[in-house]
Image (cartoon, rainbow, N blue to C red):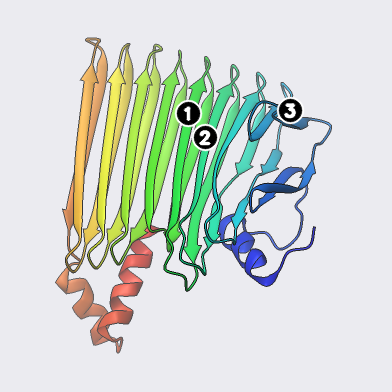
Amino acid sequence: MNFDEIEKQILCEVADLSEPPDGAYNFRVNGKSVGRKSTDNINVIPKTDKSGLDIKIEAGKKNETVHIPVVISTSGLKEVVYNDFYIGDGAEVLIIAGCGIYNCGGFNSVHDGVHRFFVGKNARIKYVEKHYGFGPGKGGRILNPTTEVYLSEGSEAFLEMEQIKGVDSTIRTTKAVLQDNAKIFIKERLMTHGRQTAKSDYEIELAGKDSVADITSRSVAQDRSMQTFSSKIIGANKCRGHSECDAIIMDSAQVYAIPSLDARNVDAELIHEAAIGKIAGEQLLKLMSLGLGRSDAESRIINGFLK
């Protein structure tokens, strides 16, 4: 695998990679797989009916890792990729995804990724997804991820969804269905600027007894950008669900928070919290009193908020 400097920069940003990793992986560059590796416990199989992969993790295997980064450095490329993950009972795996787009031309570059996770009983997954865009072209950098998670009895999923910068438009759709004693924890971090738009749409169904969901979103909207955060938690059994949206709004940006709680069982405990506001003046004053300029002080506050 030979990557140019732009492709290396993208891989570093979205997957923290400078060389092929240990474990299983698939590298996708400009619509094609340029490197793929299976291991004894993880099978990475190209789909035959459409673009994408079937990734199968053997039951009972621990400390497994899969990397599936996507790189686009061609203006005008548009693709839809379907990746299905089958995690065997009792397995534990870390999945590093992410997509970066470099656009130096006048045409939109678009990546739509559909990831489905079928998690076996008492299995555990951590899924890390980072999105990043840059380049001097006027064409858009557009990323639309769809994530579906199906958790069997006693399984757990930890999702970290991050949009670093430079993505002009994104629609982020996440759905999950949990069975008895299953748990899902989702952390979203994103920033928009210019005239960028970002929509996050979550729907979590707590179908099983004693299932648990926790969604936390932190975002910063700058300039004239627009963000929408929509979350729906369905409590169909004795369960606990919590959704929290915290946003910093700056300049002439707009932020919408749309919570929805749907209790279908008397023992469903569902909570939603939302807060939208500007950077606190006392925080700015404190940092500026230490010698920082206003822009540097704002940057430090934002970076701390998004961690």
Observer-side mark, 3 or 2, equals 2
Q: Quadrant of residue 10?
A: bottom right
Observer-side mark, 3 or 1, equals 1
Q: Amino acid at mark 3?
A: Lys
Residues under labels 3 and 2: Cα distance? 25 Å
Label 2–label 1 contact, CB within 8 A? yes
Count up the numbered dots: 3
Q: Amino acid at mark 2?
A: Val
Taking depth in this image into account, of 267 and 253 the one nearest to the observer is 253
Residue 102 is situated, as x and y percent measured from the top left of the image, at: 54, 64
The numbered disc on residue 148 is 1
The disc, 2 or 1, on the residue closer to the chain's N-terminal end is 2
The disc, 3 or 2, on the residue closer to the chain's N-terminal end is 3
Residue 295 is situated, as x and y percent measured from the top left of the image, at: 29, 80
- Please indicate whether residue 257 sits to the left or right of residue 167 in the image: left
Taking depth in this image into account, of 223 and 118 the one nearest to the observer is 223
Which residue: 58% across, 22% down?
119
Mark 3 Cα within 10 Å, few/some/many (few <14, many 20+)? some
Residue 107 is situated, as x and y percent measured from the top left of the image, at: 47, 60
Observer-side mark, 2 or 1, equals 2
The disc, 3 or 1, on the residue closer to the chain's N-terminal end is 3
Give the position of the C terminus as an image quadrant: bottom left
* Vertical order, 287 against 264 (above or below): below
* Vertical order, 203 against 252 (above or below): above
Taking depth in this image into account, of 78 and 243 the one nearest to the observer is 78
* Vertical order, 37 against 58 (above or below): below
Give the position of the N terminus as an image quadrant: bottom right
The residue wearing badge 2 is 114
Q: Amino acid at mark 1?
A: Glu
Look at the numbered disc 1 and give the secondary structure of its residue.
Answer: strand
The numbered disc on residue 61 is 3
